[in-house]
Every structure is written in structure tokens, then in C-alpha cells.
């Protein structure tokens, strides 16, 4: 005699009479979403905490450097003015001692050629802070590949801003060192000229004076005044802050996206190993839907 399959009994029967079945409305994927959102929030908080410590430390250094540079600039301005007068006097005096305009002209042309080479090498003149520090922090529905690209861009600009800041932060002391070096070199050259040097020694002394002239020209490192320096330092600090803010958001979004990808892979692996159970779960959903429709029509 053939066996006839019967649908599970309707609600209302005793529990021991009705066979067990999967939960028709259960969807554990929502738990994965919550877990991954938490991962993103955690990562964003970690990056924000790290950034806050760095920015706070740089802000303190910024306030100190701003006050120190104003004092250093005032002292340097006096040294530069006095050294400029002394330099011109020594150049004229040495020119007369050499007593050959052709030698002096060649030395000056040689100095210009060397300076051209230096200009081609680039240098630290002017503000090193990047003006392009606006980052796209709208991470909704952005694919993981784009998030990684944004992270790389924000990290690059942030690193540049921090390098610029760290390079400029010691400028008050460096400015004082440069003006001190100018004074000491002029004093040494003046002393050597007083010893009655002759021939090639005079050529070398004149070359040293031309180098000191270049030191004086470059002493301000491209900053017209204290305000220019402070504004550049502030720009670097601000760019670093914006970069870290963007990185915190982007890193959080990446952590969420990576978690979701991993969860999806795990769900697919689990599905492949429990096809019968998943099939029955889907069947139970269809059965419940059909039962509800039948009850509604009755």
C-alpha cells in the first residue's frame, strides 16, 4: 500500500502531534548587519582616538612655535640687516684686493650657474602645505574598491601635511641657527682677509662671500613675515585634522564593508553545507503563506 504524504497540521493541535519545522520568519542576516555596523563604529572610534592624540600634541606645538617665531623673526631681522651691510663692505674690499674684474665676473657667473642647479633641485622655500584637503566622506553605498582608493588618497594628503608641519615646527630655532651661521662666517672671512691672503685664497674668500650672500637671500625660507609662516603652519595642521577626520569615517566604512563581505561568504559556505535544511525553511515560508491566504479566504 502506497504511503501518502500529509502536510504538517495546522496550529491548534497538540505540540506532540505536530512535527517540528524551521522558523518561517527567521532571518539571521540581520544579526550580521548589526555586527558589521558595530565593527565599523568600533574602527572609526579607534582611528578618531588615535588622531585626537596626534592633533592635540601638534596643536600644543603650534601654539608654542607661533610665539617663538615672532621673537626669532625680530632678532633675525636685525642680524640680517647688519650682515647685509657687512657683506657689501667685504665684497667691495675683496674686489679691490683681487684687482681683476675678469676674475670677479667669472666668480659671479659661476655663482649664478650653481644657483640655477640648486633651483632645479627644488627646496624648502615657501609654504609646503597642500591646499587640496577637502575629502569626500559620503560613504553610503560606496563599493569597497572606491573606499580603499579614498583611504589611500586621504592617507597620502594627511602624511604630506604632517611632514610639512613637522618640518616647519622647528623653524624658529632653525632661523636663529641660520642667522648665527651668517654672522660667524662673515667674521671668519673678515679675519682671513686681515691676514693678507693672496692668489687662489682670495678667489676662495670671494666665493665664500657669494655663498653668504645667498644665505642672506634665503634666510626667511620664502616667508615674507611672521604671518606667512604661522598661516602655513596652521594650514598644515588643519589639513592633517581634515585628513584624520576623513580617514576615521572611511576606515569605519571599510571595516563594515569587509565584515559584510566576510559574513556573506560565511553564509554561502553554510548554505552549501545545509541545503536540505535551507530548502525546508523556504518550504515552510511558502506553506505559511498559503495557510494565511486560505484563512483569509475562509
Image: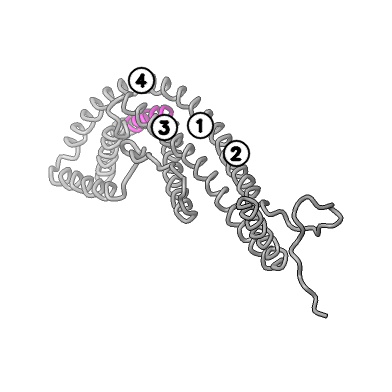
Q: Residue furthest front?
A: 298
Q: Is residue 195 visible?
A: no
Secondary structure category for the residue under label 3: helix
> What residue is pinned by disc 4?
75
Left or right of 216: which side holds 63?
right
Q: Say whether residue 292 is magenta.
A: no
Tell me which residue sits at (47%, 50%) in the image. 147
Q: Earlier in the sequence, mark 1 or mark 3?
A: 1
> What residue is pinned by disc 1?
55
Q: Earlier in the sequence, mark 1 or mark 4?
A: 1
Q: Earlier in the sequence, mark 2 or mark 3?
A: 2
Q: Earlier in the sequence, mark 2 or mark 1?
A: 2
Quadrant of the image containing the N terminus: bottom right
> What residue is pinned by disc 3?
238
* Of residues 175 and 53, the one drawn nearer to the viewer in this rendering: 53
> What residue is pinned by disc 2?
46
Q: Earlier in the sequence, mark 3 or mark 4?
A: 4
Nearer the observer, disc 2 or disc 4?
2
Q: Relative to 211, is 10 above or below?
A: below
Cα distance between the residues tagged 3 and 4: 29 Å
Magenta highlight range: 171-186
Amino acid at each position: 500500500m502506497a504511503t501518502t504524504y500529509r502536510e504538517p497540521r495546522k496550529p491548534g493541535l497538540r505540540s506532540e502531534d505536530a512535527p517540528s519545522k524551521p522558523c518561517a520568519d527567521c532571518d539571521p542576516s540581520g544579526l550580521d548587519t548589526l555586527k558589521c555596523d558595530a565593527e565599523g563604529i568600533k574602527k572609526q572610534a579607534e582611528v578618531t582616538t588615535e588622531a585626537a592624540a596626534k592633533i592635540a600634541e601638534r596643536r600644543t606645538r603650534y601654539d608654542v612655535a607661533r610665539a617663538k617665531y615672532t621673537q626669532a623673526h625680530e632678532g633675525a631681522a636685525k642680524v640680517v640687516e647688519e650682515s647685509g651691510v657687512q657683506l657689501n663692505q667685504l665684497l667691495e674690499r675683496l674686489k679691490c684686493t683681487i684687482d681683476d674684474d675678469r676674475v670677479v665676473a667669472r666668480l659671479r657667473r659661476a655663482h649664478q650657474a650653481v644657483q640655477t642647479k640648486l633651483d632645479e633641485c627644488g627646496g624648502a622655500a615657501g609654504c609646503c602645505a597642500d591646499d587640496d584637503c577637502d575629502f569626500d566622506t559620503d560613504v553610503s553605498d560606496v563599493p569597497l574598491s572606491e573606499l580603499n582608493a579614498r583611504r589611500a588618497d586621504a592617507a597620502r594628503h594627511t602624511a604630506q601635511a604632517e611632514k610639512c608641519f613637522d618640518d616647519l615646527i622647528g623653524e624658529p630655532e632653525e632661523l636663529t641657527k641660520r642667522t648665527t651661521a651668517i654672522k660667524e662666517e662673515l667674521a671668519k672671512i673678515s679675519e682671513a682677509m686681515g691676514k693678507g691672503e693672496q692668489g687662489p685664497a682670495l678667489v676662495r674668500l670671494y666665493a665664500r662671500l657669494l655663498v653668504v650672500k645667498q644665505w642672506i637671500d634665503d634666510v626667511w625660507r620664502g616667508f615674507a613675515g611672521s604671518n606667512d609662516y604661522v598661516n602655513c603652519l596652521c594650514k598644515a595642521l588643519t589639513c592633517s585634522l581634515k585628513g584624520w577626520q576623513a580617514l576615521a569615517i572611511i576606515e569605519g566604512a571599510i571595516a563594515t564593508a569587509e565584515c559584510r563581505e566576510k559574513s556573506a561568504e560565511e553564509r554561502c559556505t553554510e548554505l552549501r553545507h545545509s541545503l536540505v535544511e535551507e530548502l525546508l525553511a523556504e518550504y515552510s515560508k511558502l506553506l505559511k503563506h498559503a495557510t494565511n491566504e486560505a484563512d483569509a479566504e475562509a
